[in-house]
Image (cartoon, rainbow, N blue to C red):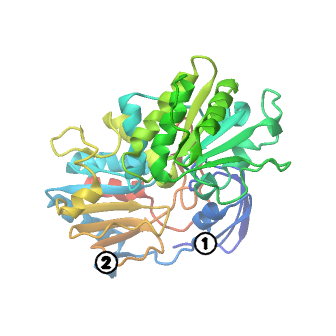
């Protein structure tokens, strides 16, 4: 590990941690200590300020050289009959190297957030959707409907950056924008406008959300609803929301799939997306799925353009074989189908591999702690701090450049996985 004691201030730094890729951060770097000085939030500050501790690779808890760790990981993979490369919390080049290694070792690939991501992916594959971008939201939205999600918990600066921005490109009066929460009640006041206008909250339990969305869609289609209420919400209140959606010039319906944690949530997402399509017969409306944490959007983008499929694709037959159910890492590990697990987690020290009987190789952020010491642990650099990189933000249309802020001496995920691939 190398360390310079000279302090340096970095301006307009992009965050790889927040999903919306906030690119206005001011970062102070002194030695290997990183501090967010301006425009930080709870997620961004944790991501940037997690200290470096262990920098030495380990085999079964014993410190070894990086070369020895790579050699041992290669041996495990070479002798594996059912390898899985999962976690995949990395940047674009890290994901590319994981794909190349999976192809050569005939492994299965999966992301640690796939359970949530597939609530969206299954809809995209089945009936498609009409979604917008963060830039379009900033410049056009007049009515934002938040479905079943507490946005400011997962995306603390979303409202500041995308809804209550100072101005729009087309002269819209920002204060005229309206926010409606349908389902979860927000935990804070981020959705309140700068002049104090509160969001409307139409609350219901998660279990009732599928029925509530179905009734809202039916009302938008002009159907008669015989019930007086659904999920504790008066149907008349949903009818008013339906009218507001029809009258809006550019409504956006947004959700975070990770917060729609109930059975068959993908069906509710599909209902939302079909509702958005139907609104476009008379006005303009778009969906906005929020995600992008731990490189999940990046990993799925890379997999899609290289293999033609998203995560949960298997290469054991010598070609990409996609199955979102059989290639679920958690299911495979629980059923003892995996003999070697390569786990990649370069952003968050808390994202450790699931417990299993498989031989485990972890490429993780420095400071990671384990209930069960992996067979091999290789501390790797964090994209956007320890090395340059690119990461896709939540709307999938922009890959954001990430800067190297310090010289920690830690290898990148790309370097380690590429070395393993070349050694096979």
- Return the residue at label 2: 372
Q: Nearer the viewer, mark 1 or mark 2?
A: 2
Give the answer, above or below, for where 103 lies relative to 42.
above
Residue 35 left/right relative to 265: right
* Element assignment for label 2: loop
Residue 304, given in percent of the width and then of the height, sits at 37, 36
Residue 20, given in percent of the width and then of the height, sits at 60, 47
Q: Is residue 142 visible?
A: yes
Extreme right residue here?
195
Which image quadrant is residue 285 in? top right
Q: Residue at x 37, y 38 (%)?
A: 122
How crowded pointer 2 is (Cα within 10 Å; few <14, some 14-19, many 20+) is rated as few
* Element assignment for label 1: loop
Residue 424, given in percent of the width and then of the height, sits at 21, 55
Residue 155 left/right relative to 189: left
Dot 1 or dot 2, earlier in sequence: 1
Q: Residue at x 20, y 65 (%)?
A: 76
In this view, the residue in front, 29 or 102, is: 102
- Return the residue at label 1: 32
The answer to whether the residue labelled 1 contacts the one labelled 2, judged by CB atoms less than 8 Å apart, is no
In this view, the residue in front, 54 or 272, is: 272
Give the answer, above or below, for where 173 lies relative to 54.
above
């Amino acid at each position: 590990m190398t360390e310079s004691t000279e302090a340096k201030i970095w301006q307009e730094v992009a965050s790889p941690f927040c999903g919306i890729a906030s690119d206005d951060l001011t970062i102070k770097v002194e030695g290997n200590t990183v501090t967010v000085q301006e425009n930080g939030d709870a997620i961004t500050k944790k991501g940037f300020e997690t200290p470096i501790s262990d920098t030495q690779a380990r085999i079964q808890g014993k410190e070894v050289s990086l070369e020895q760790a790579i050699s041992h990981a290669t041996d495990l993979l070479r002798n594996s009959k059912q390898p899985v490369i999962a976690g995949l919390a990395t940047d674009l080049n890290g994901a590319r190297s994981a794909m190349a290694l999976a192809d050569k070792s005939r492994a299965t690939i999966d992301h640690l957030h796939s359970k949530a991501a597939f609530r969206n992916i299954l809809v995209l594959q089945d009936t498609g959707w009409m979604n917008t971008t963060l830039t379009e939201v900033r410049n056009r939205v007049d009515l934002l409907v938040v479905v079943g999600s507490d946005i400011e918990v997962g995306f603390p600066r979303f409202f500041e950056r995308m809804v209550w921005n100072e101005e729009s490109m087309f002269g819209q009066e920002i204060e005229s924008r309206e926010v409606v929460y349908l389902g979860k009640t927000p935990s804070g006041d981020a959705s309140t406008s700068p002049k104090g206008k509160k969001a409307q909250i139409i609350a219901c339990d998660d279990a009732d959300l599928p029925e509530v969305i179905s009734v809202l869609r039916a009302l938008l289609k002009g159907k008669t609803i015989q019930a007086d209420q659904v999920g504790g919400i008066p149907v008349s209140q949903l009818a008013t929301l339906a009218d507001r959606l029809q009258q809006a010039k550019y409504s956006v319906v947004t959700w975070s799939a990770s917060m729609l944690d109930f059975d068959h949530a993908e069906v509710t997402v599909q209902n939302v997306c079909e509702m958005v399509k139907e609104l476009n017969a008379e006005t303009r409306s778009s969906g906005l799925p929020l995600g992008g944490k731990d490189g999940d959007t990046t990993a799925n983008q890379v997999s899609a353009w290289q293999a033609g499929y998203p995560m949960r694709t298997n290469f054991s037959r010598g070609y990409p074989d996609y199955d979102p159910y059989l290639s679920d890492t958690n299911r495979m590990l629980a059923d003892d189908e995996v003999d070697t697990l390569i786990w990649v987690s370069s952003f968050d020290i808390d994202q450790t591999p699931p417990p299993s009987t498989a031989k485990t190789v972890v490429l993780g952020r420095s400071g990671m702690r384990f209930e069960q010491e992996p067979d091999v642990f290789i501390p790797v650099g964090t994209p956007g701090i320890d090395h340059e990189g690119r990461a896709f933000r939540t709307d999938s249309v922009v890959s954001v450049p990430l800067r190297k802020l310090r010289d920690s001496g830690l290898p990148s995920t790309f370097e380690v996985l590429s070395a393993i691939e070349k050694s096979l």
